[in-house]
Amino acid sequence: MVPGRAVVVRPPAAAPGVPGRPPERRRPRSVRARRSAPGRALGPLPRRPGRVVVQLVLPVRSTMRPARLLACLLAAAASASACSADDLLHPGQRPHERNAGLDWRDQVIYQIMVDRFSNGDPNNDLNVAPSVPGRYHGGDWQGVIDQLPYLEQLGVTALWISPVVKNTEEDAGFASYHGYWTQDFLRPNAHFGDLTKLRELVDAAHARGMKVLLDVVTNHVGQLFFYDINGNGQPDDTLSGGGYSHTCLQICDNPGRAAECSPDELIYCQQGKDYLERIIEWDPEYDPRGVQGWTSLGFSGPADVRFTDWPELNRTPPPRPPEWFGWPDDKPWFDDPSWYHKKGRVYVWWHEGDYSPEFVREQETTGDFPGGLKDLATDNPDVAEALTRVFEYWIEVADFDGFRIDTVKHIDRPERDPDVRGFWGKFTDRMRAKAASLGKENFFIFGEGFDGNDALIGSYTHGGQDGDGRFGRFDSMFYFSQKYRAIDPVFKQGAPTKHFECLAKARTGAALDAWCTGEGYAAGPTFGTTPHAAPEAGGIGLAPAQVAVNFLDNHDLPRFLFESRPELLRVAQAFLLTWDGIPCLYYGTEQAFAGGVDPRNREDMWAGNPARGYPGFSTDHDDFAWTQGWIALRKEREALRRGGLDIRWSTQVAGARRDAGVLAFERASASDKVLVVLNASDQRSEACAPAGEGGACMVTTFPAGTRLVDLAPGSDGATFTVGAGGVVTVDVPARTVRVLAP
């Protein structure tokens, strides 16, 4: 073969399929595998039957790595510039959006899964299969640019876009269209465009007054290596009898060593006898002492880690960074096994009650993410520095206004160690400092903690102090505890509206009444109550407790309408856009999308909603108008954006009562005040107690004689007069919201 030339190598004839197993779900077999440690080559792996493989033979001194050349080949149809001498843009001197005076409470975030939003450039439709939910469909950054007028008409002001970095192409028949399977932290995903197009998107959004938030993954990478448990050099899908872990067989079940096992490990091993009967080398179950090599003769020490070299699937070791990145040649990179925890996949989810919180959190913070996503050792200083510099680069080169960060609870233990800086204490402060160095103020960082434990997710918003001084963490969190403990129970199941009050008060340390504590709410403060940094230092100047990111659904959950009714979605949307914090809409909510679990909750926006008869990006129907109207009202009334929250009525009992489903709260700023009264029940209700409980009605802070008018979109314009002592009787039709103001 001629060095530097791509050569097509045809594999042997296809072998018979595996009975009972659909071919599209098979794990791809390797062309080659790389040794876990540098300097020792391993033999070739069996080629996957029926696949045409491009094998790349490069000269020793070549600077073009196979993965990079593949990216160029994949992107050639999309852009000639993608195969230039350097398919990265060196951080240049382009101006950055300053964001001076920005208040994030004024924003309405709109979450976009780029592959499913709009296909603006068919030239980058690489390996697309729009009819298959788990494959790429063709959306791209040009498509988002094309639909900015639609988003502006809707009224949203900040776009959260899915991850932009190069991913592994597929795993087990599913594609990486979502962006969470990183292969190369420094190169853009050619399915969406090149770096020039990404910056064009950000600049175009800025020109319309919109901010852009990047979805960031630091916890794990894609399926780039396997654990060679049996030592045969190939990734086996099943090893019979190998699933019962080393910790169990070698230690806990060994009478001479059982004392070394913790009570949690003993329980884990007892359960393991029922479910750990086989193992997949891509995704072995968690072992507290690390994934171990195993054969029929017994255990043989830590299993080798073998990176695959499958360029046709982008499943190659992450390439070293370019020279201008300035990473020392003698330091490891993401292709080094020492940069990973190597303990196997998290098992304890849905079994948390069987174990101590400590054991659960140990798995969550050191285990691989299910699906073969390998856990990065962010406690390794070199790993932490590399990740920090990578995302400093993305701020500089693309001018993002903030980050939404994935899988936050899988790194660090702030609930246990609040004054240990850890990875997040360093990373978030460095991102703010980087933004400030570029002249950017108000760089917003919020995290995802997929958990209903309010105290746990809130712990990531508290700053701390160590020997080096004060440090910050997250400005906010994606409010999963509110989703699980209040939004779904109240709007879908008719639970008491007091749940909203307990969560809101817990954020600032005021959830002290007996009902809240009886329901298991922490007294708080669950969220941080002081800002991490001033705007001129790259912070947002607001306490985390003020800016919780509220949502109804997202890409990891079924759509709200999948489990509810349209009229309840409307009440929930009104709540979202009048409650304190920052509202976040998942794309397609305004089109009444109703998909179920992943991937069917990731519909193609351009296809519209056939069930409702809506074409793609339709703006002439009631669902769009409803969302648009509530966003407009939020923009119009400062109190709904920046006002404090004062809950005037909530219910502690479910059922058909006079006040069934009622939640009432005042929002007041220095120059504006409104009273919001919502009714999530199927009956007409009042903000008054039943007669048997005294019949008292809601007390407000408005003066007696004040005439309040309903300003809600689509309202009947009803008026209510405040009586003596601020008492007002407000009746609300079923599944309706009133916004009252003088």
Image: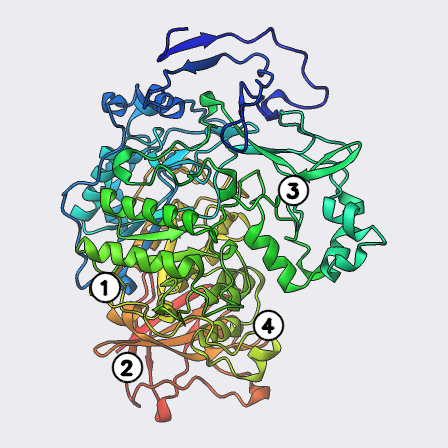
State the image quarter where residue 329 is shown: top left
For residue 407, above or below residue 679: above
Query: Mark 2 touching mark 4, by CB under 8 A?
Result: no
Residue 71, visible in the rendered structure: yes
**Residue 469 position within the rendered picture, expressed as x and y whole percent measured from the top left:** 35, 71
- The local secondary structure at tag 1 comes to helix
The quarter holding residue 527 reads bottom left
The CA distance from mark 2 to mark 4 is 31 Å
Residue found farthest to the right? 255
Q: Earlier in the sequence, mark 2 or mark 3?
A: 3
Observer-nearest of 548 and 297: 297
Disc 4 marks which residue? Answer: 654
Q: CA distance from mark 4 to mark 3?
A: 49 Å
Label 4 vs 3, first from the N-terminus: 3
Residue 537, numbered label:
1
Q: How many residues crowd around disc 4 within 10 Å: few (fewer than 14), some, or many (20 or more)? A: some
Q: CA distance from mark 2 to mark 3?
A: 69 Å
Residue denoted by label 2? 707
In the rendered structure, the answer to whether residue 135 lies left or right of residue 706 reads right
Q: Position of residue 716 (x, y in %)?
A: 34, 66
Binning the other alpha carbons within 10 Å of mark 1 as few (below 14), some (14 to 19) or many (20 upward) gives many
Q: Secondary structure at mark 4?
A: loop
- Amino acid marked by disc 4: Ala
Q: Is residue 522 above or below residue 211?
A: below
